[in-house]
Amino acid sequence: MGDLLGHPRAALARRFGKGMVLRLDQAMGSAPEPVSPAKPPDHFAVRMTLPDPIGHMEDIEAGIDRLLPRLCASLKAKGRGVRRIALQAFRSDHAVETIEVGLARASHIEDRIRPLLVMKIEDIDAGFGIDMLRLEALQTEPLHDVQAGGHLQAGAAVRKRLDGHTALDDLMGRLGARVGLDCITRLHPASSHIPEKSHTRLAAAWSEAHKGAWPRSPAPRPALMWRPEPVMAPDSPRLPQTFRWRGQTLERLRATGPERIAPEWWLDDPDWRTGVRDYWVTDTTDGQRLWLYFAHGATMSPGWFCQGSFC
């Protein structure tokens, strides 16, 4: 480097090019090296200052009708859709009331956002009056314009739009405004031979529905499944004729089984410390169909348990 810097700049430029000489000058600090900062993300928010304080729910709803079209127009111009939106009500006593709603699918359509906000208006405490309303898109996602199709593609486009399940998304949005979107879940198949681990639970608003058939189980699985509950019966692998469960004395009518399932030896699951299980589909004389199993015992004692019901 010292030998290179000792040569005249013109000779260096002829030998290595002007770009190399410029990079050397920038490395030594004798030439500026401008840095272009990253563009800040788009921020979508609108507000409205009120001439007189308001307090009625109808007035707040009217304010939403004025703010929401402006916000949706900004989102549409940038090709974005809102997933979470907040309405802030600034009171005359300097307090701020905020409500938030989420959408199951990003959108910039007013008719899909407005009902969710209106459902939450009752949570706003107007106090001595509201001076300003502010609507902000807290989370947005890109939306792609739909390409117009010709006459031959019109039928397919209609079917595709109907298959979009927008009605289901709107329903999830309405329910989510009441109970929270995280409380609405859907099941997806999981890779495990353990019955209670054969599926995984995902938030419906943030996941797609499973497409295709579920993996078939080697034996029937109950419609209702819970953590194993002890059954009072002799500690013998032979299926008992009578047993006691949940305060009931039940008598076996017929049974199908056993289906043997071994625990996942590479995991320490507290519910499977009783070792290998033999499952029986058991019909009782009072009309119940239960999923019983006998645990052969491992780190815990053997015994009978009930894990589900087919009714």
Image (spheres, rainbow, N blue to C red):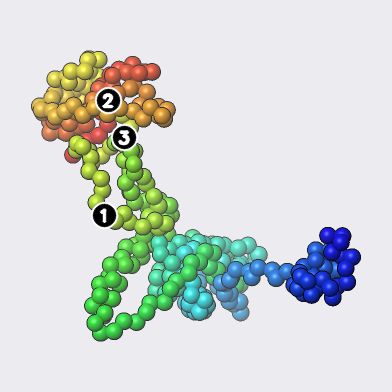
> Element at badge 2?
strand
Query: In the picture provided, is 241 more to the left or to the right than 135?
Result: left
Three-letter amino acid code of the residue under disc 1: Gly
Q: Amino acid at mark 3?
A: Ile
N-terminal-most mark, 1 or 3:
3
Q: Quadrant of residue 105?
A: bottom left
Q: Which residue is mark 2?
A: 277
Judge from the rendering whether residue 86 lies leftward or rightward of residue 277; answer left or right.
Answer: right
Looking at the image, residue 4 lies above or below residue 289: below
Residue 256 in the image: x percent, y percent?
14, 29
Q: Secondary structure at mark 1?
A: loop
Q: Earlier in the sequence, mark 3 or mark 2?
A: 3
Q: Residues within 10 Å of mark 2 (few under 14, many from 20)?
A: many
Crowdedness near tag 1: few (<14), some (14–19) or many (≥20) residues, C-alpha within 10 Å: few
Quickly name the residue at label 3.
Answer: 194
Residue 30 placement: quadrant: bottom right
Residue 238 vertical position relative to residue 269 in the rendered view, above or below: above
In this image, 30 relative to 157: left or right?
Answer: right
| Above or below, comparing residue 246 to residue 109 in the picture | above
Residue in the image at 30% along x and 36% along y: 193
**Sequence-wise first label, 1 or 2:** 1
Query: On the image, numbered disc 1 is attached to which residue?
Result: 212
Identity of the amino acid at label 2?
A: Arg
Expressed as whole percent of the image width and height from the top left, the position of residue 252 reads 13, 25
CA distance separating discs 1 and 3: 21 Å
**Gap in angstroms between the C-alphas marked 1 and 2:** 30 Å
Residues at discs 1 and 2 in contact (Cβ within 8 Å): no
Q: Is residue 245 visible?
A: no
Q: Is residue 98 visible?
A: yes
Give the spatial CA distance, label 3 vs label 2.
11 Å
Closer to us: 20 or 292 = 20
